[in-house]
Each structure stands twice: as C-alpha cells, then as structure tokens.
Amino acid sequence: MPGTWPVLNRNRSPFASAIRLACVVFAQVVALAASQGETRLVAAMVGAPQVVFDPARHACDGHDVPDAPLRAYRDAGGTLRAFGLHYENRRLSGSSLLALKLECPVVFRANGRPDPARYDDRSWITATWTEDGQRISALIHHEFQANRHPGRCRFKEYIACWWNTILGAESDDRGASFRLLEPAVVAGTPFRSEIGQGRHRGFFNPSNIVRHQGRLHVLIGTTGWSPAEGGSDQPGGVCLFRAESLANGDWHAFDGKTFAARFPDPYRTESGQGRRQPRCQLIAPFPMPVGSVTRHRGTGLFLAAFSANQGTPDGFGGTYPRSGIYTASSRDLVRWSPPQLLMETRSLSDNACGADVLRSYPVLIDPDSEGRNFDNTGDSALLFYSEMRIAGCDHTSDRKLVARKVRISSFIAE
C-alpha cells in the first residue's frame, strides 16, 4: 500500500432435467428484464470537500497517514469506530463520520519479520464486520516486503519484491485490539515468496464486507500470475469472495460458475506446488481494487466506488476515457453495469508527474446507514478518499482524509 498501487497484469436424470429447465427459465427472465430496461444507480457530487483527518494536526506519529480505504462500524456502546490509516493500525472514534478522532494506542501491528511463512511483516486493517458491536472481524492486507530483508529478494525495488496475502483477524473488545485467526490466510497465491520474484504478486486491497442472500461477500484485488510462476493462468483484476461465517476465515472465490475456488496458505501445502491450482473469475468493470460496495436501500442494488486509469479496458469493449473515481451498480455482485464517472482525478496507479494531488481509496458511506457496518445507503452518502500532495513526480507523506457529499439516484437504462 505505501507509495503506489501495482499496475495489474490482465493477461489474462429428472433432477438434471429440472436444473436445465431452471436455467432456461432464468435466462428468459434475464432477457425479458433486459428488453424492458434495467435499473441502474448513478452518483453525483453535491458538496464541497471537507478535511476529516489531517496528519499535520491529528496524527500521533509519522505513521498516521490515510493509506487505506476508510472502514467504519458502530460498536456495542453506540460509538462509531473506523480504520483507514497505516500499518501501525490505530482506531478512529467519534460520534459521527465527520467528527472522528484518532486514538494513539496501536490496536494491531505486524513485527517486520523476515520469514514470509509467518505473515508478520507489514499489515493494514482493510475491512471490518461485526454482528454485535463487541466482536469485530477484520480482513488484513499483508505485505511481505522482501526487499527489506537480506537474502529474501535479489532485487532492491519494493514493487519487484512485493508478495501480498489477505489474512483474517478478530477482536473481542470492540476493536481495541486484534489477533490473527488460525489459520490466518484468507487468500494467498498458490506459490510461495521467491527470491527471484521480479514483480508484484498476490491478493490485495479488499473492499468492505457486505451481506447478500445471507452470506458475506468481499471483492479482492489480484495481480494475477502465469503457470510459469507456479500457479494457474490467473489474470489480474478483481475477484469476488464469499463466506458462510467469519469465525474461521473460510472464504471461497467465484470461479465463473460457483464459489468453489480456494486460495489457502501455500506454506501449509506440499511446497505450495503440485496440487490442483485454483482460478477465480475476474469481475468487470473493475481494473483495480474496489474501494467500497454499499447496498442502496431504495432499489436493493449494490453500488461500488473504485478508481480507474485512462485507457484501461472497462470490461464492456471500450476503455476508460479519463482517470478518476467511478461507480457501477449490480443486483448480484457478479454482473455490474457500465461504469459512471464520479470525479475526474489521478490516483496512486497513475503517473504522478505533473499532478498536484492524487486521490485514492474512494469509499461511499451513508452516515444514516442501517445496522452496524455501514454497508447500505439511502439517496445520499459521503465520498471519502485519501488526497496525496505530489512534489514534482514524487509521492509525499502529505496526505489528508477528505469527504464530499454525494447524491445517489436510479434510472432505467435503455
């Protein structure tokens, strides 16, 4: 997460009769809905930017910069809690989303260990979920930064040695402290960290968690990999994961037909090789990690917020016309509408040269969201994002967490 996002590599019986009949009926229903027009969501800016967190005024130390999407929940006492800063994970708390204050105790920290099998190098809390406000489940974006550890990578560059895994964690004290689950790995590569890696690899930057049809879902970015790298032919992009429960971190990815793909710890399998390699289906139109997913209460549709670069394929036969923050809507989290531009801006995966600021980690949150997890919205919401100042062509630690009011409306696509 620090500094830049990687650019993704997009290489790329009677019972049976009843099933076939159900599929035909479903296809006919889909075709009928398409012929009658499809309901979609669109978001538009209606408010001026407001700084919510400024490290120059609010930080406990130099680690406290907005370096992850904002994730919020209401705890058992009714206090609003949030995460969205750096790998020295500290909790933001307050009475409202626009009145968050940083608490200085570190609630979760990895120890910078040089053994990739320990998953204890650099960790960010990047998704949370709670049923009761007391026990908080979390997904962790973990980076093994092999360039920092002698003998672990033959390259010196961070991105050439970057090996990333999504881990599961939980808290029993409303988020005042977290511990890793056992086993910890939610989504890992089918191969281990390698000295000669040469490029970024792994799963990274999960969206927030949402409930759909009684199960929990999350969208997770992947760099993709090839058979030559020790895995299946997995293109880079975004995959959809589903879990029955967060208690054991048992997440399965959508493989194009069902949620059957699993990506367990490669250090707990036979050399991480020689087994049937999983492959997850990419979810269009997302070219890079999804900042947030929220369910619109009026229509039941999901609305995603994400960044995209100019010229990147949009999943509908075209390309993104401008770099910026986009939205797309969906009824089932698998099939999404064509993207709609919300804000034109460069992000962490754009060329920084010539830019004044980069805006990344877009998240839509409704302050009046129902439930504890801020996973639904009405016809208005706040767009949160990290705004980074650029010096020449260089990223800086001058970052602020900014919020802008957004209006959400529905329309019928012809």
Image (tube, rainbow, N blue to C red):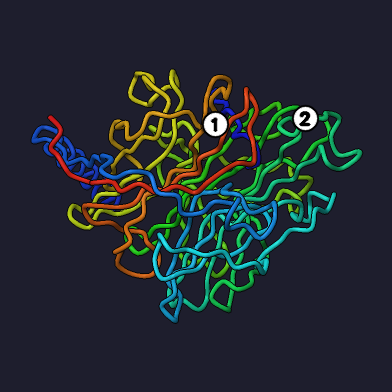
> Who comes first in sequence, dot 2 or dot 1?
2
Q: Residues within 10 Å of mark 2 (few under 14, many from 20)?
A: some
Which residue is at 25% across, 52% downward? 380
Q: Nearer the viewer, residue 276 or 399?
A: 399
Q: Which residue is mark 1?
A: 236
Residue at x-position 56% and y-position 58%:
139
Q: Amino acid at mark 2?
A: Glu
Q: Measured from the top left, where is residue 145 in percent x and y?
A: 76, 42
Q: Residue furthest front?
A: 57
Seen in the picture, residue 376 relative to 360 is either above or below; the reply is: below
Q: Quadrant of the N terminus?
A: top right
Query: Residue 89: x percent and y percent?
Result: 64, 60
Q: Would residue 99 be seen by someone viewing this image from the given angle?
A: yes
Question: Looking at the image, which is closer to me, 289 or 16?
Answer: 289
When asked about the image quadrant of residue 37, the answer is top left
- Dot 1 falls on a residue whose secondary structure is loop
Residue drawn at x 29%, y 45% is 47
Q: Which residue is mark 2?
A: 157
Amino acid type of the residue that numbered disc 1 sits on in the rendered structure: Gly
Quadrant of the rendering where the C terminus is positioned: top left
Residue 377 x, y percent position in the rendering: 28, 56
Mark-to-mark CA distance, 2 and 1 = 21 Å
Pick the front one: 334 or 393: 393
Q: Is residue 392 left or right of residue 386?
A: right
Q: Position of residue 104 (x, y in %)?
A: 65, 67
Which mark is nearer the camera, 2 or 1?
2
Q: Locate residue 370 relative to residue 123 in the image: left or right.
A: left
Tell me if mark 1 has few (under 14), some (14-19) or many (20+) residues whose alpha carbon lies within 10 angstroms of its own.
many
Secondary structure of the residue carrying numbered label 2? loop
The residue positioned 59% from the left and 68% from the top of the image is 103
**Is residue 113 depicted above or below 304 in this figure?**
below
